[in-house]
Image: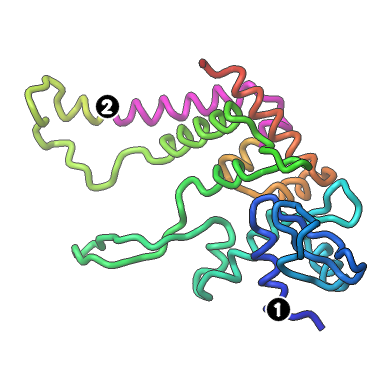
Amino acid sequence: MMSVRGIGRALARLAAPEAVLAGNRDGVGFGVYLGGDRRRRPVARLSAAEVKALSADGVLAPLPEKGAFVLSEAGRARLRRQEAPEAEGFIAQHAPMIERVVVDADGDVRRARAVVAGAGLKRLAMLRDARGAPWLNPAELAAATRLREDWERGQIGLVRGSDWSAPPRGGSARGPGNAQEMAVGATCDARRRVEQALALLAPPLRRVVERICLAEEGLEALERAEGWPARSGKIALKLGLAQLAAASPA
């Protein structure tokens, strides 16, 4: 019988950068090795049955080396769900959450839990190749960041509750009408930049970039939806972001 607590502890260890799950040196079960260094003792252990079940559930992603695994995107989502309070588990599985101070409609100050902005981009930066090196280079990550920022600007539109009839601050000749026009123009410009960037990509690459960078879906979910083999989503994502990076001004 699998130990839920033991599995959770092993997955938490496996979430560390460059951690690898591989067969133990004694030939019994599997161990989690930090930094991929199997000369050291494993920091957590799993049985062969547990590894088989976790792999079947998509929690573990196989490496090119037979019998070695890393934590998949689905596994990281499961870990976030397990570590979050019960009421927010299914929100936390999509992105990390933090506690913030907010002011409600009545002006009362309270603390609330919220999704961390840009969590999807942080997950992109954590992608690694088989040797543990970053999968995306700085230019590709910058292209993803620009696209995401423009997309978010395009979604915001005008701020609810803004008083456009108030007189302008300072001595500028820019009036409230111009301020509203500038806000609308900034939103339209952001949407135009997103559409122009995505138009550079072939349809399959566009779908990958949209779903990973904008919708913040996991790579495994994308591959299942597209009917692609494992790890092909990473390759398509890199190709798409490389093309966006090449088209962006330095």
Identity, as a three-letter code, of the amino acid under mark 1: Val
- Mark 2: few/some/many CA within 10 Å (<14, 14-19, 20+): few
Which numbered dot is residue 109? none
Q: Is residue 34 above or below residue 222?
A: below
Q: Residue at x 82, y 43 (%)?
A: 228
User: Of the numbered discs in the image, which one, if any, rests on residue 181?
Assistant: 2
Rate crowding at label 1 as few (under 14), some (14 to 19) or many (20 or more) other CA atoms within 10 Å.
few
In which quadrant of the rendered view does residue 49 lie?
A: bottom right
Dividing the image into 4 quarters, which one contains the N terminus?
bottom right
> Magenta stretch mostly in which secondary structure?
helix
- What residue is rendered at 83% in x and 66% in y? 30
Q: Amino acid at mark 2?
A: Glu
Q: Nearer the viewer, residue 26 or 249?
A: 26
Where residue 209 sits in the image (x, y, percent)?
Answer: 64, 35
Residue tagged 1? 4
Asked if the residue under mark 1 is in contact with the one under mark 2, i.e. CB atoms within 8 Å, the reply is no
* Badge 2 element: helix
**Of callouts 2 and 1, the N-terminal one:** 1
Q: Is residue 213 above or below residue 243?
A: below
Camera-nearest residue between 52 and 17: 17
In the image, residue 70 sits, relative to residue 13, either above or below, namely above
